[in-house]
Amino acid sequence: MRPTASAMKAEMHHAATPPESLWSKGWYRLAKPLASPNHGPRPGLTPTDLVVIHSISLPPGVYGGPEIEQLFTNTLDWDAHPYFQGIRGLQVSAHFVVRRNGELLQFVSCDDRAWHAGVSHYRGRSQCNDDSIGIELEGLEGESFEAAQYETLVSLCTALGQHYPIQHIAGHEHIAPDRKKDPGCGFVWEFLQQNLGWPASYFPESVRRA
Ligand SMILES: [Zn+2]
């Protein structure tokens, strides 16, 4: 298969930087580390072969504030906004957050189990937190995302694919279709498929490009 332009670019980049040096115990060196207490060990019975894409903003539709970091580090002031009262006490995390400007934050080592998927089922397995890597895009489900976010996402997924046995990438909406709608119809799966150069079989059937 002919590599895409971006895959060749990624290859050239990684020729200069050996892929293994981008990782230290599951922490990605190009992300800003902000350790979250909301994680645990992976059961380790299955390979970490799934990337889950989410969207989040707090309050919904408001961008650029510290609230996502605060939520994932259990420091959010639940009384600061009426919306927060509805999620009071929630203990969640994702491995990564991609801000609107493309800035990449990491909250949990990819070797550990983050708490982003909830009740979920995909590729014949339940409890997707056990063996997936969660990436939150700052945004609102159904709305569009920024070019800088796609750029960060493509380089992060490329690095993940070189370090973990990734064979699937899906939205929260695909692994928990009864409960979740993120990242929603504003997320362009086709861009990801074209620019990652991953086989079509890695993508959910409903968004897959022939
Ligand atoms: Zn989600």
Image (spheres, grey):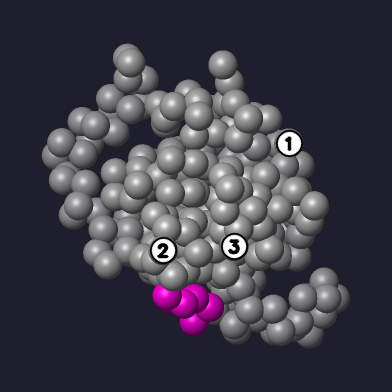
Say what secondary structure mark 3 lies in. loop
Percent coordinates x, y for residue 32 in the rendering: 39, 64
User: Which residue matches tag 3?
Assistant: 127
- Residue sitting nearer the eye, 21 or 104: 21
- Residue sitting nearer the eye, 200 or 87: 200
The label nearer to you, 2 versus 1, is 2
Cα separation between marks 2 and 1: 33 Å
Cα separation between marks 3 and 2: 12 Å
Q: Is residue 169 above or below residue 65?
A: above
Q: Residue 102, which numbered label?
A: none
Q: Is residue 25 left or right of residue 84?
A: left
Mark nearer the N terminus (3 vs 2): 2
- What segment is highlighted magenta in the picture? 34-41
- Residue sitting nearer the eye, 35 or 40: 40
Q: Is residue 20 left or right of residue 127?
A: left
Quarter containing the N terminus? top left
Disc 2 + disc 1, Cβ < 8 Å: no
Q: Is the distance from the Cβ of mark 2 to the nearest ligand 1 atom less than 8 Å?
A: no
Q: Residue 45, which numbered label?
A: 2
Judge whether residue 36 is colored magenta: yes
User: Which residue matches tag 1?
Assistant: 185
Tell me the amino acid under the disc marked 1. Answer: Cys
Cα separation between marks 3 and 1: 24 Å
Q: Is residue 102 above or below residue 35?
A: above
Quarter containing the C terminus? top right
Tell me the amino acid under the disc marked 2. Answer: Leu
